[in-house]
């Protein structure tokens, strides 16, 4: 080698290349890692990363990719690493005048996980918006958030009332947002002040008070609960009618009727004393029962309308039923999952008419154990349309001669059913199932306005129908588990730990022994607690708190068991007229009892049930929201006729801003803290509102007298003040 030959340059060990020699992506991330405490302005980042003109496009693309993946977070014109900036992706769930709340978009997030957002830190984000939230602590150590970016704007319509303030129009949203939004004259679309309306955000501003709303639809006066319910249905995109292809298909099915050839392939049960039991006004009757005692075992038949025979996969009827997911019942109204030609007609198990059914034939021991079960396609002729109230009269001896004559053929079965139901109920509670009562409201409505509200009563016949349906549902899920079929289960998780802790605190405060409650509390332990206060003044309080402590039951393709019922296997089989999950189960079990190979069943349903279960859970929650919101409107309308009247009630929940009082008729209203005697009130353990100087306490379960002072029918809100007993 010649001595003057240049050797290749070698970097000394431990030295670094210049910043520009590193790949651009590494230069960007390295700079952001160095700046942990605050975001870096994008133009400064470009300088620090030595981005050349030819790298500019790549620089912008990398930032967009990192942002989409959640690696970095952008705040206006600056960016930082998400891991350093303590940011979460969340959805705005509530907006008040000076603050709001966002719920993290993590699986299982609930109200307890909501992030407090000062109003000045919200960037005008609206309910439903998906946002990026930076977390921090206030001066008291509480976690709060700052909206750094609105990732997705919600374009959902919302119900409200149109207001006129000195010639300027505003829409006041019903819930989730307490800030009135101005409506320009051109966007009022004929709505008048005081009208119930459906609105949307027409123009977004930089903050909540600079948004502008647009009226989409008007429903008439907001003082009418019926009008307000129409707006609620529209805001949830409820399907109010069936399209023509669906109606045409329903008419065709009804006109075709039942072919004699179909009966040849089914078990003939028309000779048995089978009958239905429902409410007096029920038209969609999808279950019937029969019962015999053979030696030392019970033979229970649960016969369900064979809806899957009429509603074929992929048909217009099926597509519409799937989209609805469930029938929706509110006040005295129903939005059926299937057209009336099916729900009230060919599928309904009307008396003295031959109907196609899917029967669960169950053998039960004298102790209430399920010994054997068989599912079979059948046909029945119901002996009588049983009514809960009438059968309860037979059982308690108050029924008149006309009622006894109506049921004469099945009276022996009615008393046998009471006997079996008592055995099943005892067995269920022995294993730890909780006897929690959820109070439902019965609305008496005349000419579209509510005249009275009563708690819906549950007598003996309601309870034994519930026991029989539970057994059939348990058997259906057991078939699926034993045969390893793809399925839609009804699952109920253990209660969240934080809610159990809150329940234990309450129990201790009211003097209930909690020493037997384990850390991972069981349903049996909670059931024992409830039974220990049965018949005392604490019963309703503990019952309600147990309800609030429970997780939500949902549909799932994975069987994780049912906490509340203490069952390993549970599903919904008994209501295919009004619940789509039951229809799915009928199809799967129909394939199974029809002899389809398991491989074929797996192929047909294996990839379907998971998504269908999630969809059905969402539809169910949507229906619950509609029913709750509509019933709140009717309750407020009813109480509008009782302004100034005094009622005795019980404190049902306590908040920092006051407490709610529930009346015996199920109506609930707020006693706001501003309407309490002057003082300094603090919330203790979410159970009591305490005035510091006098130590006056308002706690859950406490009896109080209240006077109705204001109602908002549109928002379904009722205001009470404390009143002396009169």
Image (spheres, grey):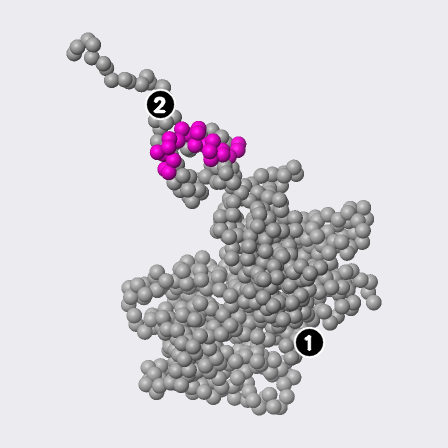
**Foreground: 695 or 417?**
695
Tag 1's secondary structure?
Answer: strand
Residue drawn at x 65%, y 79% is 446
Residue 254: horizontal and vertical position, in percent? 41, 83
Label 2 Cα neighbours within 10 Å, binned few <14 / some 14-19 / many ≥20: few
Q: Label for residue 17? A: 2
Marks 2 and 1 close (CB-CB < 8 Å): no
Specify the quadrant of the image occupied by residue 199.
bottom right
**Highlighted range, magenta:** 37-58
Tag 2's secondary structure?
Answer: loop
Residue 541: horizontal and vertical position, in percent? 67, 60
Q: Is residue 469 visible?
A: no
Which quarter shows the N terminus? Answer: top left
Specify the quadrant of the image occupied by residue 355.
bottom left
Answer left or right for 49 relative to 433: left
Q: Label for residue 360? A: none
In the picture as drawn, the residue positioned furthest to the left comes out as 1
Residue 333: horizontal and vertical position, in percent? 57, 75
Q: Is residue 351 visible?
A: yes
**Foreground: 149 or 441?**
149
In the picture as drawn, the residue positioned furthest to the top comes out as 3
Answer left or right for 662 relative to 113: right
Foreground mark, 2 or 1, reads 2
To which residue does mark 1 refer? 451
Which quarter shows the C terminus? Answer: bottom right
Q: Is residue 56 magenta?
A: yes
Gap in angstroms between the C-alphas marked 2 and 1: 83 Å
Residue drawn at x 53%, y 43% is 148
Q: Is residue 212 magenta?
A: no
Q: Is residue 551 above or below residue 195?
A: above
Residue drawn at x 40%, y 86% is 255
Label 1 Cα neighbours within 10 Å, binned few <14 / some 14-19 / many ≥20: some
């Amino acid at each position: 080698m010649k001595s003057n030959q240049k050797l290749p340059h070698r970097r000394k060990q431990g030295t670094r290349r210049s910043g520009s020699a590193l790949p651009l992506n590494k230069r960007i991330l390295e700079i952001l890692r160095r700046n942990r405490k605050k975001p870096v302005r994008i133009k400064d980042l470009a300088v620090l990363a030595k981005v050349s003109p030819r790298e500019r496009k790549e620089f912008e693309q990398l930032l967009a990719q990192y942002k989409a993946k959640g690696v970095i977070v952008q705040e206006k014109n600056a960016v930082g690493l998400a891991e350093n900036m303590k940011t979460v992706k969340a959805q705005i769930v509530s907006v008040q005048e000076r603050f709001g709340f966002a719920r993290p978009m993590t699986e299982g997030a609930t109200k307890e996980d909501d992030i407090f957002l000062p109003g000045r830190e919200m960037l005008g984000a609206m309910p439903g918006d998906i946002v990026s939230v930076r977390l921090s602590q206030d001066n008291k150590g509480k976690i709060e958030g700052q909206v750094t970016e609105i990732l997705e704007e919600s374009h959902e319509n919302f119900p409200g009332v149109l207001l006129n303030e000195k010639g300027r129009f505003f829409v006041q949203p019903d819930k989730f947002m307490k800030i009135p939004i101005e409506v320009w004259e051109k966007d009022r679309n004929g709505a008048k002040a005081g009208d119930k309306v459906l609105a949307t955000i027409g123009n977004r501003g930089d903050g909540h008070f600079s948004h502008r709303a647009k009226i989409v639809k008007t429903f008439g006066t907001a003082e009418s609960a019926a009008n307000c319910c129409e707006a609620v249905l529209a805001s949830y995109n409820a399907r109010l009618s069936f399209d023509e292809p669906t109606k045409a298909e329903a008419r065709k099915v009804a006109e075709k009727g039942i072919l004699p050839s179909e009966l040849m392939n089914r078990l003939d049960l028309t000779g048995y004393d089978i009958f239905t039991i429902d409410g007096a006004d029920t038209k969609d009757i999808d279950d019937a029962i029969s019962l015999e005692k053979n030696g030392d075992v019970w033979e229970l038949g649960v016969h369900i309308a064979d809806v899957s025979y009429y509603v074929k996969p992929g048909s217009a009827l099926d597509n519409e039923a799937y989209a609805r997911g469930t029938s929706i019942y509110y006040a005295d109204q129903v939005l059926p999952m299937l057209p009336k030609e099916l729900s009230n007609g060919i599928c309904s198990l009307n008396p003295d008419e031959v109907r196609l059914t899917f029967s669960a034939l169950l053998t039960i021991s004298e102790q209430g154990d399920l010994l054997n079960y068989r599912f079979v396609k059948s046909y029945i002729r119901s002996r009588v349309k049983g009514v809960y109230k009438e059968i309860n009269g037979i059982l308690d001896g108050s029924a008149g001669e006309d009622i006894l004559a109506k049921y004469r053929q099945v009276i022996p079965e009615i008393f046998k059913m009471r006997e079996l139901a008592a055995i099943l109920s005892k067995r269920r509670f022995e294993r730890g199932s909780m006897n929690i009562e959820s109070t439902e409201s019965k609305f008496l409505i005349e000419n579209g306005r509510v005249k009275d509200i009563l708690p819906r009563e549950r007598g003996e016949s309601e309870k034994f129908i519930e026991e029989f349906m539970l057994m059939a549902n348990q058997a259906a899920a057991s078939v699926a588990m034993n045969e390893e079929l793809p399925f839609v289960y009804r699952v109920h998780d253990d209660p969240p730990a934080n809610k159990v802790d809150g329940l234990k605190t309450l129990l201790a405060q009211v003097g209930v022994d909690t020493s037997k409650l384990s850390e991972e509390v069981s349903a049996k332990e909670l059931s024992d607690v409830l039974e220990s206060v049965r018949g005392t003044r604490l019963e309703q309080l503990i019952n309600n708190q147990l309800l609030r402590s429970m997780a939500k039951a949902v549909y799932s393709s994975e069987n994780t068991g049912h906490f509340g019922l203490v069952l390993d296997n549970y599903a919904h089989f008994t209501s295919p007229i009004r619940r789509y999950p039951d229809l799915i189960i009928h199809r799967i079990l129909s394939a199974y009892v029809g002899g389809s190979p398991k491989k074929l069943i797996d192929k047909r349903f294996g990839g379907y049930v998971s998504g269908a279960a999630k969809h059905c859970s969402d539809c169910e929650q949507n229906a619950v929201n509609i029913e709750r919101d509509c019933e709140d409107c009717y309750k407020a309308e009813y109480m509008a006729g009782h302004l100034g009247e005094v009622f005795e009630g019980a404190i049902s929940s306590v908040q920092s801003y006051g407490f709610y009082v529930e009346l015996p008729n199920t109506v609930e209203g707020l006693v706001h803290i501003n309407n309490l005697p002057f003082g300094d009130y603090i919330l203790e353990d979410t159970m009591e509102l305490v005035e510091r100087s006098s130590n006056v306490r308002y706690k859950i379960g406490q009896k109080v007298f209240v006077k109705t002072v204001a109602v908002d029918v549109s928002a379904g809100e009722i205001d009470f003040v404390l009143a002396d007993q009169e």
